[in-house]
Amino acid sequence: MSSATLSNTAIKQPNKLVLWFRYLRRNPSLTFGLLILLFLVIFTVYGLLTIDPKDAYPLAVRSKQPPSLEYPLGTDFFGRDLYAAMVVGMWQTAVIGIVAGALGTIIGTILGFISAYFGGFIDTAVTSICQILIPIPAFLIQVVIAGSIDKRSVTIFTMAFVVLLLAWMGPTLVIRAQVLSMKERQFVSVAKLSGMTSLGIIFKEILPNLLPFIAAAFIAQVFQAVFASFYLAIVGLGPVREPLLGNTIWAAQTQGAFFNGWWWWPIGPAVAMILILGSLALINMGMDELANPRIRKSE
Amino acid sequence: MANLLEFKNVSKVYSRGKVENVALDNLSFTLKEEEPTILTVAGESGSGKTTLAMLLLGFISATYGQILYKGKDIDTLRGNEKMSFRKEVQAVFQDPFAVFNPFYTVDHLLEVPIRRFKLSKSKKETRDKMAEALTAVGLQPDEIFGRFPHQLSGGQRQRINIARALVMRPKVLVADEPVSMVDASLRANILETLQVLQKDYGVSIIYITHDLTTAFHIANSIMVFYRGSVMEAGGVDEVIKTPQHPYTQLLVDSIPWPDLDRRWGQTDLVPSEDTVIGEGCKFSSRCPHAMEICKTRPGLFQLEPYQAASCYLYEEKPKLEGENLSSALPI
Amino acid sequence: MNPVLKVVDLEVSYYTDAGRAKALDRVNLELHAGEKLGLVGESGSGKSTMALAMMRMIKPPGRIEHGKVMVGDIDLMKLSEDEMLDARLSEIAYIPQGAMNSLNPVTRIGSQMTDAIKAHQPRMPKAQMKERAIHALESVELKPDVFRMYAHELSGGMKQRVCIAIGILLEPKVIIADEPTSALDVVTQRQVMETINNIQETIGAAIILIGHDMGLMAQSMDKVAVMYAGRLVEVSKVREMFTDPKHPYSQALIRSLPKLDVKGVFQGIPGLAPSLLRLPSGCHFHPRCQERMDHCDSVRPENQVLASGRRVTCHLYDEEAKEAKQVPA
């Protein structure tokens, strides 16, 4: 039996961190998105550590003050410290985004797997629901639902729930499509030959390969959730007392901030919204490229 | 004399509405346990050879007939018996790369069966068994452990596939075109490995291919398929050196020999897309010797102790019943 | 007679995260009209890169560093993007590996063929384009009906022949076919090879067939070129290659071929082909060479011409090549 006479001709891969850095250089979308997000996270964490959350609620401080050293973003008509309001608002936005996004992704992934792997009635039911509901603009459904809840029982969690109701469908279809194609791959047949059960194959063989898709779906869902919390709050359907970024803008608009010369009121949340959505969108675009198997092969 | 594997009048038919496609047509043969052998199933695409592999591995069920493993119908196996069957009937596939899950190192391919079939009691024992299998196929374990599939050559990957099968000490190995996607210069090693499996580890190999040259070198017996039926069967020397069925003759004639004095293409070619399968002999529309009687399906005729062909050219020879096909195979 | 294809000192590198891989290392090749050259080598030896480089289809992170590719009198490397676009298919055609799977599934074969013609000769009247396409189909022994068919209605062998037909539409001087029969059965393979032979005789093009099946080369080619680790180690006429190979790697290749008379004897080539990222110094084959000499690991062997016209890249023939140079042609 002829054996190799050369010892070890395999290439030495440079260590993983270096490869990651090189990749980030090639993917500016992802890099910028992550940097902006990092900045926002630091801002929020620092803010939470330094402010008194009570200041974010009405009647906490003197009202209608322009920006100054004591109140970096000024105060509003109701007596909120706008800087504190923004910090708390960012935090609450993050909670809605992550909770709704994570739950939506988890449910979507589970449903996607079950539909694709086992097929049959469940598959037909799930895909039919998705195909009927997805074309309807989520905004309409959410407005109807949010509008019919009693104003007093609206909290950030009800908002997250409203978003979640529709968030699971996107990931379901994406994951289902991937699992359908993966289950025909030969390494799945070989796993069967090696004695693996269906469940084992789902978790150990298919799931690891889907992590990039799941991550991309998660980012997309967080984006949708954050965006939904903005537009629902801006039209006044959010928990009005909370300093949600959208709420602040809604309050500023209904109190006629610009007419009254309180120009500083909506600025913070507006800029924050742009940065948050922008960073999530950039990360999402960057993830698309990462999840694409053609790119992955070159790693 | 226990029968390890038995095909009893097995047919596989795919129907789509009114259109029927007979992938495998009433095949019967047996493999005995005590004499590990290498049996070639040869044919072009559409011959039914892949269907045979899928049936054998239990990935699809027969439409008619039974497949028996150690006397039991494989469709009826459950629990421990099913696990036993799984462990003892293994496969090596054509594409050395596709069998690896890109997420894991190549170790994963060998670890999974050891774990699932409880072949070891400790991590060290697992590692040892893996190293043993890798060495048996001619690889150096140090060069293989911890590597990803794209870091290895096609030949190495395919040998790891064989090592995976070996780890389970199977009785039957279905090798579906194991070298066709491997570079010609690396094939020799893989073929040698298969022979080692048969001689030293007592594994019967069902070698599926359309490449008669490699079949000639490692197999003992051969069955040549065309459109789901056996055209010729027998010892590999007899069938390849002196093919009797016109189809086998066509196949042998089309082999590109690396020898300039042995030219291919002496016989005329009727391209297969121009032909239609009727009630009679499946090959008749492409056959240079087609006669009137070929409009009915010929049975098998025994030409030599180890050669039988399904062709009316040999009408005078003794008939061989389909169920006794295996008697023409020198196993 | 001037060669219809002349490749001079072609060099291609791939700049990957793990380093620079030299895929083609000063490759020289000549082909005359009507000649059929088989290019063999293991995966990773550089054969497909050679085809892509000749077509100027190398994409980043690959780069053509150096070299000339002359088709007739034109150096393809000196052409502008537009001129090269025009040269592809009309001067030099490429049938890639797996081409039969890249036929457009939703348009008819005929439109795919006329599209190719249109791209080069937009003013040609439709009827004439159709005529040319049908003529090409008939040259590859397909019925004119195929013009109106879709890819899924054809068998593997037929699809491959369609790809060949597309390759000959504009009667190029050079046709490069990359593993045209690797996915086909042995009988269909014979058919396709016979087709390639026929069309080559009709339009007189030079053909480069890339593959690794030595038997196929023996049965259908005039010359064989062997690649190893990015270098062309030998170019010989086919009979010479199989009866008297010069380079040790070619010799090992020929020895490893299964023969019909001796059963069960296998002679694999010991060792592994080197990664293009970490090539051995001097001669790339020296770690596996049984006839290695002292300077083989430090001095790079040159591509030399021997008296018989054969080309070898090996120190064993340094003397012979020197003598060949001194004798006037």
Image: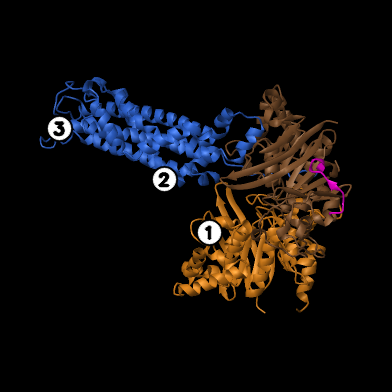
Question: Quick one: which chain is orange?
Answer: C
What crowding class fits label 3: few (fewer than 14 Cα within 10 Å), some (14-19), or many (20 or more)? few
Disc 1, disc 3: CB below 8 Å? no
Disc 2, disc 3: CB below 8 Å? no
What crowding class fits label 1: few (fewer than 14 Cα within 10 Å), some (14-19), or many (20 or more)? some
Amino acid identity at mark 2 = Pro
Q: Position of residue C109 (x, y in %)?
A: 53, 62
Residue A36 seen in the current view: no
**Range of residues picked out in magenta:** B315-325
- The residue under label 2 is A28
- The residue under label 3 is A254
Quarter of the image with the C terminus of chain B is top right
Q: CA distance from mark 2 to mark 3?
A: 39 Å
Verify whether residue B324 appears in magenta.
Answer: yes
Mark seen at residue C150: 1
Q: Position of residue C9 (x, y in %)?
A: 63, 66
The answer to which image quadrant residue B81 occupies is top right
- Tag 2's secondary structure? helix
Q: CA distance from mark 1 to mark 3?
A: 63 Å
Residue occupying the far right of the picture: B305
